[in-house]
Image (tube, helix red, strand yellow):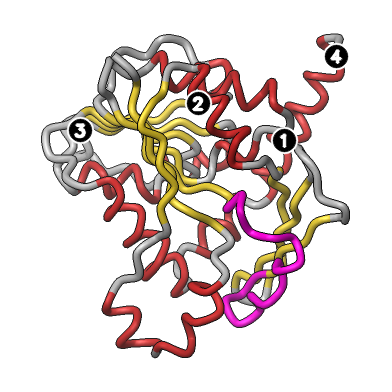
Amino acid sequence: MSAAPDAARAAAGVAQYDAIAVPYQRSKESPIRRYLESHGFFALLGEVAGLAVLDLACGDGFYTRQLRQRGARQVLGVDISTAMIGLACRQLLPADTGLDYLVCDVQDLPDLGRFDVVTAAYLLHYARDVGELGRMCRSIARQLPPGGRLVAINENPDQPECRYAGYLRYGFSKSVASPRGEGSPITYAMISGRELFRFEVYHFERATYEAALAAAGFTDIRWQPLELDPQGLAVMGAEYWSEYLGNPPVVGLTARRAG
């Protein structure tokens, strides 16, 4: 494939993220983001005090800031979107030492040093084909020493396409053209306040993700459901969460750099 189509695809991807930066930031206030995604992410991650963490697809720095607040000694947030990083930088305080941001496509990351953990909440499923997925995984592996961890939130590859409906109570919908195949675009439509915004991710089978990670040098690859915060259960009630937990659209993913 020539460089021109690749560049055009990359530019379209950046435009997608830039366009949704502000409404996507506001969506972090939803119960799903607060009680399930955020709680589940940090349950997977565990203790970060004293660690160096690379936060990929950091967006407006939602997790990047929390990682530093939880004691990580160094946190670098990376996102492809200049608008997202702009939102993150505007929230920096003079006392925010050990916290920095970089605009870069994960596929093109230089060697940034060695991090104990790479976090990637909603990254890998933005790969548009197996080649891009492989480049992402290799780029992540380069930033980790042997034994270093990857902790991610990702599209649930095992979710049947016939079960993509049923999320309107949570403020979003999910759809894919049938028949779904490797690299099929999945469209999310989300409500932030009164504003509707859309973005696309891509479907890959579990085996495809695992093969890309293994080829990049990862082992101990595990898929794990996100853990619900007990406070969310108390506040919203069990019935509210039943559809999401019974049919999770996303899942936790962890792996270690072989060594």
Judged left or right of residue 257, residue 84 is right
Q: Is residue 199 above or below residue 10?
A: below
Judged left or right of residue 253, residue 95 is left
**Disc 1 versus disc 3: nearer the observer:** 1
Tell me the SS state at disc 1.
Answer: helix
Q: Amino acid at mark 3?
A: Thr
Q: Amino acid at mark 1?
A: Gly
Residue under circle 3? Answer: 97
Looking at marks 3 and 2 on the same chain, the residue that comes earlier in the sequence is marked by 3
Residue under circle 4? Answer: 4
Looking at marks 3 and 4 on the same chain, the residue that comes earlier in the sequence is marked by 4
Looking at marks 4 and 1 on the same chain, the residue that comes earlier in the sequence is marked by 4
Residue 167 within the segment the image draws in magenta? yes
Tell me the SS state at disc 4.
Answer: helix
How would you rate the neighbour count of disc 3 (Cα within 10 Å): few for under 14, some for 14-19, many for 20 or more?
few
**Disc 2 versus disc 4: nearer the observer:** 2
Specify the quadrant of the image occupied by residue 95.
top left
Magenta segment range?
156-172
Q: Quadrant of the C terminus?
A: top left
Looking at marks 2 and 4 on the same chain, the residue that comes earlier in the sequence is marked by 4
The image shows residue 29 at horizontal and vertical percentages of 45, 69
Real-space CA distance between mark 1 and mark 3, rounded to the nearest whole angstrom = 31 Å
Q: Amino acid at mark 4?
A: Ala
